[in-house]
Amino acid sequence: MENRFEDVIGVRASLSDVSYLADEGIAGIVYLADRLGKPILVEGPAGTGKTQLAKSVAEMINARLIRLQCYEGLDESKALYEWNYKKQLLRIQAEGGEDWGEIEDDIFSEDFLLTRPLLEAIRAEDPVVLLVDEVDRVEVETEALLLEILSDYQVSIPELGTVEAKQVPLVFLTSNATRELSEALKRRCLYLYIDYPDLEREREIVLAKVPEIDENLADQVARIVRSIRQLDLKKSPSVSETLDWARTLVLLGISKVDAQTATETVNILLKYRTDIEKAVKEFADSPDGLDEDEETTE
Amino acid sequence: MAITDSELENSPLLELLGGFIVELREAGLPVSLTENLDAMEAVTHIPLEDREAFKYALGATLVKNHTHWKAFEVVFEVYFSMRGEEYVIGSGSEGSDSDDNQEGDESALPGQGQPQGGGGGGMQSLTPEQLAEMLFNALLNGDMAMMSALARQAVIRFAGMEPGRPVGGTYYLYRTLRNLDLDGMLEKLMEATKSQTSEPVSQFEERLERDEFLDRIEKLKAEVEAEIRRRLVADRGVEAMARTLRKPLPEDVDFMHASREEMAELRKAIYPLTRKLAVRLARKRRHGRKGPLDFRNTIRHSLSYGGVPAEPKFRFPRPAKPEIMVIADISGSVASFARFTLHLVYAISNQFSKVRSFVFIDGLDEVTKFFEGVEDIGEAVHRVNTEADVVWVDGHSDYGHAFDVFWERFGRDLGPKTTVLILGDARNNYHASQSWIIKEMKHKARKVYWLNPEPHAYWDTGDSIVGEYTTHTDGCYEVRNLRQLENFVEKLV
């Protein structure tokens, strides 16, 4: 198998070319995934760029992104493949006189196969990145569907035999950790935890994603967000919320955040009433600051 | 430069990795054989000089649960920390690698004029005052390289480490930090920034400034800690050190003996835990058994099969939700246990039709109202601890009297749907047990469970009379850590 990446530094640089600012851990694990031919299981708080990582990697290596969004009740026919039974019926009705054996061979051929994301990723000729999003949403039993693909990059279809991958695709699985994933699944993956970024990286992200912002403001935004994350909150502000906030500040033409503006716009960062109250109390020195409803839209 | 397989086989690295993985398993991390092999393969793909990449390669292949990351980091630091002459205890040499990061520093002070890269003698000759001043400036300017050099110097000077002395790293850490007086440093830093800017600083900005400095001080502390650890490893060897540093994973931390730091960890762990539990329970309810046949729905769907009821439809099951009463001892020794249990029960309160809670020491008070319409359970639990009226005579646990009060005031509210949870260690200070009340409760209620935060071996020793109570209950469970608590609550629903 050809290696996609030269070294870790290269991965990091080309990721930042597609404006995804990876830290060393992220870049290192993406690099390893390619070398070891293993899928990456990405966990972390919501809105820290788990899905975006897969998208950016796809963009970086010019690959097609195939996405399987998981949900409760996802099954084989939605994830792997399905026989196009309507077409099969038509086929049988159209030529009644034929020998049954021939028909049977015919209707269980590729023409009647509907490929779903997983099979599609396996059979793809062009470079692909497979993203299995929010894998923790499927039931434990359904997880087993993924195992064959993740370890051997093949799918067994009883009527057709085993379909093997033409190339080992890069696979990303994301999880919000609403439940513990099975040992078997974890064992097959490299594990990557994407946490909230540290001050410097967050500032870089803001600068990269909100180009109109000036450096001082970006720095302030990153600092305030860090301070807010230190509070004991139900839901800390995510990176995407930080970006929304930064964009809002730019739109409002604010060049320097003071307590007043922070209080007025905090509901972009925080989504629970108690969290907002807590933050506002922290910003303290504006007594009339409780009025957060005067919010401008983005 | 990546190393090849054959090089790996002959290198001492393989042996070191083997020991490392054994230690991870000892620390409680589930490392399987395949993961072990993956790790071995992964390190062949990365340049060994790159310590960070090495760490992430091992982390990604061996640690599949984020709460285990901390434990992993400690073991990693011990096994793969920088080693060499300069870390031997007693040798005062130190190599600073900060060269010219003093540029642009307007407020240069006497101590800072010296060249930093001088190694050995550079910092040795400084007076403690000069050292403190340099530290102050490094913190003020966020000069990381300088901070780590100073951390090293501080450990050499203040920790007073002696070779072979069987003292844990915490002792040295404490000694070093006490001499650095970081709290005083923070105030000084705040004042320095205030005097630098001419315009008045708002409270808001001041707070941000303070957070920034706190962050830097934390980094300095971590630096000092790492330095001490490096020296201890050099002195005592890897395995002995790993053994001393071994700590329980967050889900295994004992409620009754958690340090303040571990408590903070536990509090952090409880949010994701409750969320996970709630999702799991909700799923279980939905996927339990199928309800009775839904006749109308079946007929409606049969239309697409020409009137043949090919696809029977069932109603959703609606299993009755239990009603919960929690009676918790919140006296000193078991308070934190009660706090976590209350927190957990309320966090999943939508799994129950009703939750009422009572707390006692020697008096008993209902605290249900504290939780009503409250979004922040942590806050409510805090109010329980401060506002509930639970002291009757002397503020020492008296289970007998507390049960008396409960039976008198709330006993009639018990019904066949109620499940009662009693939390406590049953250390009754030799008061009357009044265990007949528990027996009566069991008659009236659906289930009565007792949760004891003490290890099983301590039950019924000293003034503990848990045995006497639990003969009347439906079960008594040892619940010493989050893992056990989670298991119990899941069983309950």
Image (spheres, rainbow, N blue to C red):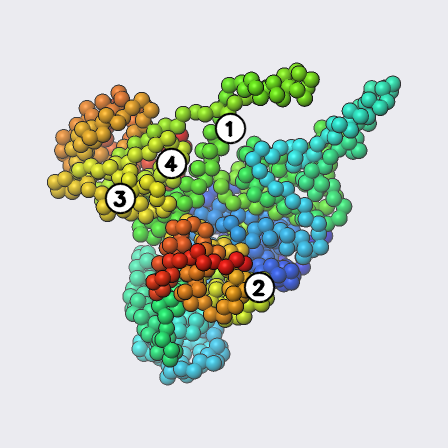
Residue A123 image position (x, y, % from top left): 74, 41
Q: Are labels 2 and 4 assigned to the same chain?
A: no
Mark 4 burial class by Cα count in 10 Å: few <14, some 14-19, many 20+: some
Judged left or right of residue B453, residue A164 is right
Mark 1 burial class by Cα count in 10 Å: few <14, some 14-19, many 20+: few
Q: Residue at x 64, y 55 (%)?
A: A56
Q: Are labels 4 and 3 assigned to the same chain?
A: yes
Give the label on residue B287, or none: 1
Q: Are labels 3 and 2 assigned to the same chain?
A: no
Q: In which chain is the residue bearing label 2?
A: A
Q: Residue at x 57, y 41 (%)?
A: A135
The three-letter code of the residue at mark 4 reads Ser
Residue corresponding to mark 3: B384
**Is label 4 in contact with label 1 (beta carbons under 8 Å)?**
no
Task: Measure how far apart labels 4 and 3 are at the Cα level.
Answer: 17 Å
Residue corresponding to mark 2: A210
Q: Earlier in the sequence, mark 4 or mark 1?
A: 1
**Is label 1 in contact with label 3 (beta carbons under 8 Å)?**
no
Image quarter of the C terminus of chain A: bottom right
Element type at mark 4 = helix
